[in-house]
Amino acid sequence: MAVIPVPGLCRPAMLKSRPRRAAAVLTVRAAPRRGGTGPHRGILSFSGSTWGCALGRSGITARKREGDGATPRAAMPLLALLWRADRIGRPATLLPARPARPGDGWCDAPQSGLYNRFVHLPVAFSHENVMRDDGLYDIVGIPDWNITRRGRGLGSAIFLHCAHGDPRQAGGLQPTAGCVALPRAVLQRLIARLPARAVLRVL
């Protein structure tokens, strides 16, 4: 297994020693389109529970490209977790985890040799700032899309993160740029239920 390129997140030995049990699967599907609802509405199911989730503004695609606003159709093991310790306590989770730090970023510039890689800010090229102000990255699950299956221009910074909006309200959850997002309280409860090996499967 590839080492997660986030300093301090975990040691290679931790990855090698994780038990080889069958992975738990979080299944994500597009929600039925009713009453003019957008393609970004999804449904996430795990262990008998179901929640409304936000997808990319363009829905789900099997041909992910940088900037298309779509969530990739793929089975993506969750390898690690970051959280904002200045905003919330340490989430209960069995995933390898560490607090996000000032300078944590993710490159989303296809022309860069660091495309879809963890970077330390400031950098001159386009990037995601993990320490963003809007709360979306208060909890961030990092799937292997960003670690072991990088492809130039094939989509970067595909995360499981917090959502804006309320699925119970008319406007619902706001679309993402291609990630899967849940209300923060729901995401906290979900990751607390996950074993050390889990897969985010988008159908």
Image (tube, rainbow, N blue to C red):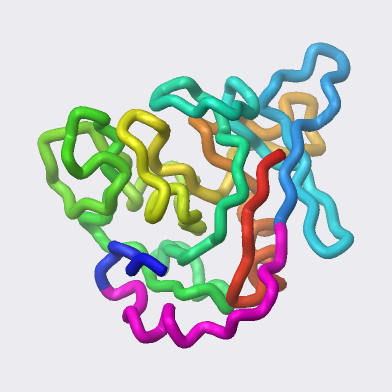
Determine whether 42 is above or below 96 in the image: above
Q: At 44% from the left edge and 25% from the top edge, which residue is drawn?
A: 65
Q: Position of residue 11 (x, y in %)?
A: 32, 80
Residue that lies at the very extreme toward the top in this rendered image = 36
Q: Position of residue 125 (x, y in %)?
A: 16, 33
In the drawing, does residue 48 fall left or right of residue 67? right
Q: Quadrant of the C terminus?
A: top right
Q: Position of residue 128 (x, y in %)?
A: 32, 41
Q: Quadrant of the N terminus?
A: bottom left
Count the marks: 0
Q: At 47% from the left edge and 21% from the top edge, which residue is drawn?
A: 68
In reply to whether residue 16 is colored magenta, the answer given is yes
Determine whether 27 is above or below 124 in the image: below
In the drawing, does residue 18 fall left or right of residue 103? right
Determine whether 176 is above or below 83 in the image: above
**Figure quadrant of residue 153:** top left
Q: Which residues are magenta?
A: 8-25
Q: Position of residue 87 (x, y in %)?
A: 45, 63
Residue toward you, 15 or 129: 15
In reply to whether residue 39 is colored magenta, the answer given is no
Q: At 53% from the left edge and 73% from the top edge, which residue is drawn?
A: 95
In the drawing, does residue 175 fall left or right of residue 145? right
Q: At 49% from the left edge and 48% from the top edge, which residue is drawn?
A: 159
Determine whether 127 is above or below 141 in the image: above
